[in-house]
Amino acid sequence: MTGISEIKEKLAGACDRDLPEVISLFSDDERAGVQKLLDAARKRHDKYLQELERIERLKEYERQYPEYEFICGIDEVGRGPFAGPVVAGAVILPRDTDILYINDSKKLSEKVRDRLYDEISEKAVSCAVGIVDAARIDEINILQATYEAMRQAISKLDPKPQLLLNDAVTIPGVGIRQVPIIKGDAKSISIGAASIYAKVTRDRMMLEYDKQYPQYGFARNVGYGTAEHIEALKKYGPCPIHRRSFIHAYI
């Protein structure tokens, strides 16, 4: 008879898709400990099935445009912070994408975002970011800087997208059909992927900036105007990555 610890290892090592097959191997085992493990595995598989259904719903917008092979999701991160760049993500996913757990990046943990960033990078048809720094934001304002970052990201894609699904905005100066979707990062798998791609890129940049300017706590606040950040601004003044147009009230 297979030991309970071995059964636990087999269940833990099985991918979500294959769990029913592993469960069936031990379903006749009446030991209470085994049945408890199997119940937990069934719940895990049920969550997997629910996630499959959710991801299929997230493909609704992409399915509305079957005439386009390369549909690109666009989203930005960093419009509100006091410091650091605004970063736009652009991602073209294959139509049969099997990447689970994509969502608005703000709803995901750092660990999940990092894992999904790697998976998106591996499986996407193409993905890119556009980055506009603080000096340029001060020069042209944050809205125009956001558009500029989005245009940068789109220009780096290969193949060129045929349709853009944007999170809420219409980007000026782009000769590609655009579909703005309110709260699109939670409604479209392509926009959600772009949100994650941009968020992870920017967060990693802010970690590097934290090493250069540790007094502002960028590793914790990623440039946002937390109480700690404001206090540091008053004490030390701004650093080169601060947006002067955002912090004039604090210096």
Image (cartoon, rainbow, N blue to C red):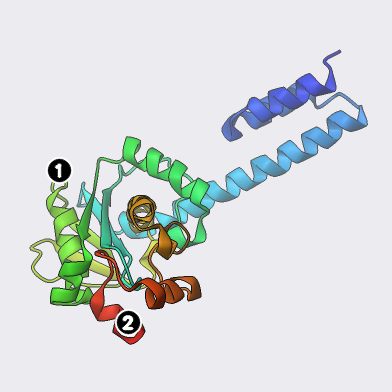
Q: Amino acid at mark 1?
A: Pro
Residue drawn 41% across the image and 57% down it: 214
CB under 8 Å between discs 2 and 1: no
> 132 or 94, which lies in front?
132
* Residue 124, position as x, y percentages in the image: 30, 41
Residue 251 - label: 2
Can you say which quadrant of the picture contains the C terminus?
A: bottom left
Residue drawn 45% across the image and 64% down it: 221
Can you say which quadrant of the picture contains the N terminus?
A: top right
At numbered mark 1, what does the secondary structure look like: helix, strand or loop? loop
**Where 208 sits versus 171, above or below?**
above
At numbered mark 2, what does the secondary structure look like: helix, strand or loop? loop
Q: CA distance from mark 2 to mark 1?
A: 46 Å
| In the displayed structure image, the side of residue 31 where residue 87 appears, left or right | left
Query: Residue furthest toward the bottom?
Result: 249
> 140 or 41, which lies in front?
140
Mark nearest the camera among 2 and 1 is: 2
Residue drawn 14% across the image and 60% down it: 151
